[in-house]
Image: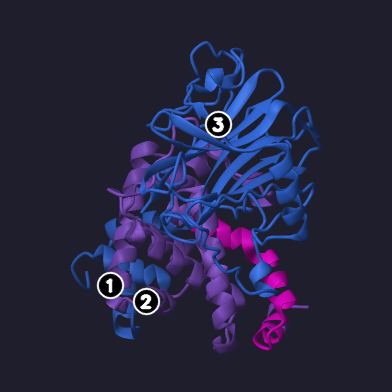
Chain colours: A purple, B blue
Amino acid sequence: MDDDQLLARCRDGDGDAFEALLLRHQAAFYGLAVRILGDHDEAMDALQDACVKAWRGIANQRGGAFRSWMNSIVARTCVDHIRSRRPTTALEYDDRVIALPDPSPGPELAALSRDRIRSIETALGRLSPEHRAVILMRDLSGLSYEEIAESLSLPIGTVRSRIARARTGLQAELLRQDPGILEAYA
Amino acid sequence: MSIAHLSDEQLSAYLDGDADGTADAEAHLHLEECQACAQRLQLLRATSQAVASLPDTEPPRPLDLAFLHQGPAPAVPLGEARRRFVARVIHGRVSTWAPTAVAAAAVLALAITWAPRLVPSAPASTAGSSSRQALRTTATGKVSPSAGDSSLNDLVAPAAGSAVAPVSGSSVQRTAVASDGTIVTMLATPPRGTTGHAVQLLLRVVGGPKGTNLAPPGMEIFAAQGQNQLRLAGSEGTSRTLKPGEELDLTVEWTAGAMTGPPVAGSYSVIGRVFLAGGKLVEITLLYPVS
């Protein structure tokens, strides 16, 4: 059963169909969340929140691809998490904690060196959360400018300028780390 | 040259096909003539493709999709002097927070077999025995072994930003991975406590790739304030061997703020300890404000 068929069932309240869609695409959703937030635990929390929001709103889903629609919700939820961070009152952890390593590599990883991926993720982590969110929504999830603008409640001009700044900022950071890194993608 | 050099925004919009017809045509003409802008476009395209090349990432644990089939469990306020303890062990599947008949039965069993006790706060190395070792990261996120520990240098460094816990959502949690791949998670819900209300605490161990051997006293959950620690639950899984991926949960409900008397607001810690064979201790602490 393809995504559209499952989505139609979801609109009729079929929880199993929604679960099937989530399981099919969860690696993409989690990959987006963890790279926006930079923290595995918070990404898991945001993805969980996004799933609940999506299920509550799925009857009003206006059509289009499930994956894009859900990516928008995941990204918006992640941005909400970032906005809700209150560093002065945030919980702090004891120092006897080891964070999760990156999950097992998927088949795409075979084509890329782990070092290169780490460099890209490190560079992304040095962008502001707002810039990181829009460049990931655009270049990783393939959302359109209009979809990003709607998801983040931003004017499209702001989205356009943020994407441009995010790309140039990321480019500068990547070249600072490794002057030859972008040759692999030219 | 048709126009002055293109701005980053113009180049980015051109790359995405977002420029309108006239702007797109002008940019196209310019790029045919201006090698500098063409090179900048090439770099922007490579940057975009670098991001697009990042692989999908499987979540570290299954999503909790119980909400698809049941309503959320209501919060259960507890009386000030009342403490209720629930221990639950689930093997080989994902647990949920919803109370179960098994959990209810466990309440009775636990009430008979053990009671909470106050123990003095002690360094991790003395919480179990003098040979215990704690997995430790520094405040900056760099892994370093505890004093006298020379066997933990193969631990994976924490991800960037992992020192700050999420404060939104329905819970707060932390996960640690031991050098043998054993995964330990401590979770508290709600993420902040209200004096006298129930806080659900979960300590979960997932067996590593080659299985995980627990050592006495197994798994323990504590609440702590200052120098006092209140042992809420344990000892679960003592001397148990977990198969790869097998889960062992210890769950307890704590009345927020309750330590030695009526619950009071303040800064508390909830602590999960898992003792592994070979004299290793995985300890996770969440600072837990109660208002």
Q: Is disc 3 placed on a helix, strand or loop?
A: strand
Residue A163 drawn in magenta: no
Q: In the rendered view, tell whether residue B158 sits above or below residue A63.
A: above
Circle 2 packing at 10 Å, graded few (<14), some (14-19), many (20+), is some
Query: Residue B161, how many percent across, how many down?
Result: 41, 43
Q: Which residues are magenta?
A: A6-33
Residue annotated with mark 1:
A158
User: Which residue is more in the foreground, B124 or B277?
Assistant: B124
Badges 1 and 3, same chain: no
Badge 3 is on which residue?
Answer: B283
- Three-letter amino acid code at the position of disc 1: Thr
| Numbered mark located on residue A149 in the image | 2
In this rendering, does residue B257 appear at all?
yes
What subunit carries mark 2? A
Same chain check for tags 2 and 1: yes
Name the chain letter of the residue that bears numbered label 1: A
x, y (%) of residue B187?
Answer: 56, 48
